[in-house]
Image (tube, grey):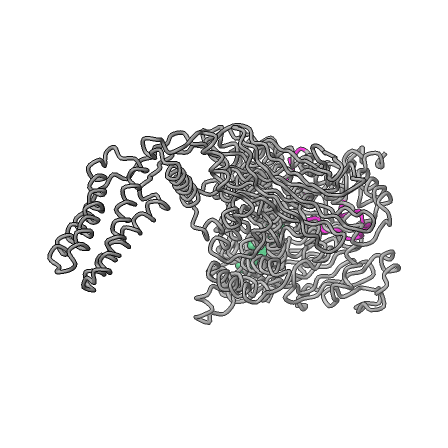
Amino acid sequence: MAASIRRSRISRISESFKIAISEIWRQTPGKAALVLFILLVAMAVIAVVTITPDFLVKWESASYWEDNPVVVPPCWVNSLGYKTAKTAQIYFTTPSSMEVSESEVRYIYTYNYTLDVNEAPKDLYVKAEVPLLCEEGVFKAPTIRVTVERPDGIVVLAWDMVIEPGKTGENVTLTCGSLLSAKTSKETFRLAEVTSAIMDKYNITVPTEIAGTNETYVITANSIMRTTIRTELENKYLTILSVFVKPISYKISLNRNTTTLEVFSKQINNLKTTFLDLGINIVLRDKIIEALDYAANNITWVINNINTVTYTDYLIAMNNAYENLNNVNKLALAASAPVDVRSSVDDLTKTLGKFIEVATTTPSLIQPEIVFDVLQGDYRVNVTITYYGVKNPPRALSAKIGIIVKGGCYGILGTADKGVDIATVVLYGTPIALAIGFATAVASVFIGVIAGIVSGYYGGFIDEAIQRTVDVLGNIPLLPILIIVGSVAQRTFTGEAKSLYIILTYIGILIIFGWGGTAITVRAMTLSIKEEPYIEAAKALGASNTRIIFKHILPQVLIYAAAVLVFNVPGAIITEAGLSVLGLRHGWPTWGSVLSSARAENRFDVWWWILPPGLMLSLTSLTFVLLGLAIERIVEPRLRTL
Amino acid sequence: MSEVQVYKPVLDKQTKLVVNGLKVYFPLRKSFVEVLMRKPRLYVRAVDGVSFDVKDGEVFALAGESGCGKTTTGKAVLKLVETTSGSTYYLPSRGIMESNPYYALYKKVSEYGHIDLQGIPDKLFKPLRRDIQMIWQDPYGSLNPRRTIFEILSEALEIHGVGSTKSEREDIVAKALEEVKLTPASEFMYRYPHMLSGGQRQRVGIARALILKPSLIVADEPVSMLDVSIRAEILQLMMELKKIHGLTYIFITHDLALARYISNRIAIMYLGKIVELGDARRVIENPYHPYTKALVEAIPEPNPERRHVIKEPSIKGEVPSPINVPTGCRFHPRCVALDQHPELEELCKKKEPPLIEIEPGRYVACWLYTKK
Ligand SMILES: Nc1ncnc2c1ncn2[C@@H]1O[C@H](COP(=O)(O)OP(=O)(O)O)[C@@H](O)[C@H]1O
Ligand code: SF4
Ligand SMILES: [Mg+2]
């Protein structure tokens, strides 16, 4: 009979746990706390299951995130009115198509990238890991060609290279065709070709009323225009922009400022006066005067027709003037004109020559102005891997090809500096935060409970000692201690486990300074429980002190301790975050470290960098405070009516 | 004129317990200022020299107003409070001693096997706890509200290693519950105290005291906190159990009517001292000490016709604090007899009256009866 009612201890504990949970669930804040808590735990579990062992070490290195755009918002902001290009990180293990001919075999990987906003991606490149094909003991390395076919049909060749086989037989891994780094490796990404193709495609030429009709000068004018636009693209925008832009309007004008021309004309006239005053051979002098007149007339003609003159006519006139001045130079030498006069003729000739040279190589006369806009539509990225002289090419090439387009947004929470994916760090920060919080709370509550019970139950000297220790600890300001010990720890610890040791140091200090409050309350509880008649009754039965502590005092203290523990969890998490933001970093991916990097980069304006870790900290605190309140209401029946 | 017979507890074959010159002083905590001023430590003289003997199988009542030190005396017998001086000699029941591994270590103070309880260390006293048990005044506070009745009762079994398995203990607990008429026992066993009435709780308290099969029980006002209607049941149960198990009771009460009904002998206590001791019926029907007289007169008159008679108050003032016990006879500030015998004033105020025999088996501590 008795046995049928008997229940095992475990089932009773699980039953009271169930009752506690349902008690919590009955309260509105308790419900919210449980939901939030389950979410947190779920995040922590996902993180622990998916985290790779090297993440803790490598997450702060730029190379770990190299394929991510840097400091970009999450992609859902586009639905809030932001205009950002999407980011693509596509990895192929099988080619999209394969072409076999007698002499070569081509494996082609194709990816269509749709650009539907007015913002160009920040970079585009291909990460290739290609095998060397071995035939008759000879390793064949492929060539890799990366092209981007624009929506308007222009095909940009971003990369075309023969792979140098590294160690025999091993796959070759390389990054090819980065449009961003094309600026420093012009031989791989031919910007000139792209601009030319765009000019051709959109019929951008120097108009005849500007250029004139002389073929050479027309070519010169157009070449100046293209060089100028290219330089402008290179300097003003990122190079990559040229792959994603089209011209929407342009204006090419001729410099119609005559100041320089008037200076030339005045100096020629001055020379004329000088020569007329010189007592040199009359015939030569007349020839000199005539040549000077020709030169002056040509320049004057340009000045007079400056509003209608073409580039061709401008330069022909200037060349005429130059030829005549050259003549004057020779004649003056023949007439043994004074040295100072001859050198001024020579100077003027050289200046004019320089003027012409500048006018034919720089945009000093031909002044193009082009307005570009982003070209929206489907871009097709083709990666072609070609092997030559392979007789039995494999159907499935064991190459790994990644096509990376760095857009203006990333993932669900965006990125921080170095391309750090905030969502990943926030996720992986969850178990660390919970571990820090729980380790600190459990340890300090554990110590507090033991100290409190010993203090209250045994009294006397040990009580006095514990209470004075609590007083002393309670009067030492915690933050300065943390800062001092934290910076010492940063300098002292080295090696692989440095981060762990620094965090453990923080936890240790928080524990040392954290148990006092619990000890005081538990002591008070113990003092009052100790005086309960049932304790004396137990003593009358012969119960030992240990028995009274474990069977009568501890169970009551533990329920209170559970509430305190839950209240204490967020404290440690927030302290860790605070220390990180203050610069006492440990190196693990915590919420505090994300905030800390924002501070280090002085980027508090980047909301997607600040809000996620900040919200996680607040939500975690909220969770545990609500949970603590709910538990407290169960523990403290007087509060239940509230 | 023969010498006056000052009371001395008898230590013979029938004596279950002797309490001799028991004093329990509780030191008061000194305040910081008092420590600085080097004030002497003050004491609550809860029990201030109490002697009595309890015969095997009797009900010995300890009576007196609340605060006079009855409970403390009872606790001192169970060694739950530290005694300042005095001794308690106890004759353990035979069954307990046979199974006690330490038996040879006890200091015997009589040829019958009485043991000096005050002199022995806790370790030696623990086996004796099985033999001396207590029923507590407060049926609410004396049961841990967080433990089931089974846990409360089996705690004693666990402590003393009675019953090796849980089911064995369950059987013992069930029997104990049946003995105190909490049936069906299997139903009560897994209830919590708050699910029980006061009377049922006190039955649990009795079962807890009895579960180790003791021979001496200190019952500290076991019915004073219960409804009047169920007091009789509980007392009857206690008397029944006494008969079945051959128990000896030290019955602490402030209710003289109850003491007369239940006990063989009675000791009246006032401010930590016994002022009168003797056969319960005789003491209550014919009290000698002015304090006993006052107590007896305060018993509500059972005859309703005489209730309206307003009696002369036979006591004055309030109980003084046990910290400042009056000099001489500690009852003198309240004694109405002293007013009628002014010739005794000097004596009563200066000298403490001894407990002397004035009739065979009747002892009183009052100068009125002490022929010089
Ligand atoms: N643990 C203690 N510390 C200090 N004083 C006590 C303690 N226990 C009892 N007292 C005091 O001793 C006196 C006697 O108490 P008690 O034995 O409980 O009286 P009774 O049971 O007769 O009512 C009272 O004045 C009480 O205040
Ligand atoms: S000794 Fe004196 S004061 Fe004390 S009770 Fe007797 S008569 Fe009263
Ligand atoms: Mg009492």
Q: Which residue appears farthest toward the left when viewing the image?
A: A277
Residue A336 rendering spot, x and y as whole percentages: 21, 63
Q: Give the camera-side residue of A411 and A381.
A: A381
Residue in the image at 74% along x and 35% along y: A101
Position above or below: A586 against A359: below
Specify the farthest residue to the right: B98
Give ligand 1's quarter of the image: bottom right
Locate the N terminus of chain A and report the quarter of the image it occupies: top right
Check residue B215 for magenta coloring: yes
Residue A413: x percent and y percent? 53, 38
The magenta stretch is B208-229
Is any part of residue A229 visible from this angle? Answer: yes
Residue at image position (30%, 51%) is A353
Occupied quadrant, residue A225: top left
Comparing A441 with A372, the one in front is A372
Expressed as whole percent of the image width and height from the top left, the position of residue B156 reads 77, 50
- Give the residue at x 46% y 53%: A600
